[in-house]
Amino acid sequence: MTRPPSPPGSERTDGSSVQIGALVPLTRPGWVEAGQHLLAGFELAVREVNDAGGIVGRPLELVVRDTAADPQRAAAAVDELARLGVAAVAGEYHSVVARAAAARADALGLPFLCSSAVLDALTEQPTQWVARLSPPQSRGWQVYADFLLCAGHSRIAVAAQPSVYWASGTRILRDYLAPRGGTVIELDMSALDPTDVCDEVADNRATALLLLVSHPEPAVPIVKSVRGDRRLTEIMIGAPAGQPEFAEWATSLGDDSAGIPFLRYLPERLTPLGVRVETALREELAEAPSFVAFEGYDTVAVLADVLRSHGTDRARTAESWPRVAVEGTRGQIQFSRTPGIGVWQWAWAPIQVVDRDPAEPNRFRILHSG
């Protein structure tokens, strides 16, 4: 499924195609499986746009760049794509990487539709150039915190690596839980190993442990240590950032992969378009598509609609964000200004808390919706 990025100089320069830059993590330390699903969604949507006549008769073309979860590499890719003349940039899964891409796009006056990164502060200042499909972290993680309370968890340990994204998540959880009687116990994973985590969880009498860490290291060793510790048989492990969504999680952990709730951005029922796209993506990926694949498809669907309606001028594309009304795979997509968020935001993207069913780890159970 992995496809190499387009080599520099290989893009068409005769003006016959309309080009969109695509930022995706396709190599480590990026989450490669997420990048593959995002790219599959992009590519399916581009094929369907072109089968339907393209952009006013011109073919739509993706110019793919691998970010490898590197913010500097992503910023350099935005510079390159701007020079190549793309009409817009789309994509990215990792929040910190998307933030770097958004900053460059804003500085260059290049429209950027962020597919899958949730960090609230995607840009330092409000910008007209950037829009986002995925829900902001504050909304999604508050839904997750509400799920924790409803499930009876008020003493929650978080095993967190140093990162703007993880620190933001910890703050959202603490701010939501504290007024409602919840306590967040932060475990610094730059100083602890998986055995230490088990000791801290037991000593602090936590009833839930949230993994705010990278996969596979140290997430997989932490799960195995907790599952093997007799003191922690009643502990709920959670992964709000969504690591268990992907098959690699189940492959790494086997039966231990199940019963770990995470956030997923799908509705209870897909739209008719979503049902059709799910079938096509399943065939393309040879597995069930993740929510990230649907985000990729919806990203191109929105950009194609904008480009057909308003042309390929970058300023006109940016001006069109508030007028978008596109039926996506997961609902009607419209952008608005959300308080505290500096980009155009799809305010009501669907949010679920789900886990892998312990009786059948390849099946997902919806535990909570927001």
Image: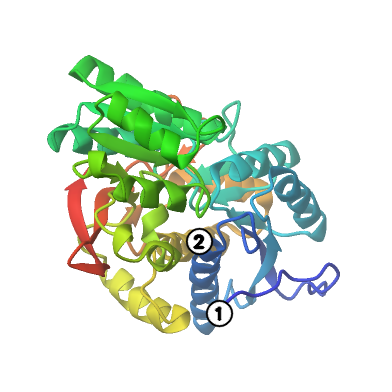
Mark 2 residue element: helix
Q: Position of residue 122 (x, y in %)?
A: 55, 35
Apparent side of residue 350 relative to residue 197 in the rendered image (left or right): left
Q: Earlier in the sequence, mark 1 or mark 2?
A: 2
CB atoms of marks 1 and 2 within 8 Å = no
Report the residue at 55% width, 48% height from top.
94
Q: Position of residue 51 (x, y in %)?
A: 52, 84
Crowding near pointer 2: few (<14 within 10 Å), some, many (20+)? many
Q: In the rendered image, which quarter is residue 257 located in?
A: bottom left
* Between 96 and 112, the one nearer to me in the picture: 96
Residue 34: which disc? 2
Report the residue at 29% width, 23% height from top.
204
Name the residue beneath numbered marker 1. Answer: 50
219, above or below 258, in the image: above
62, above or below 307, in the image: below
* Between 113 and 8, the one nearer to me in the picture: 8
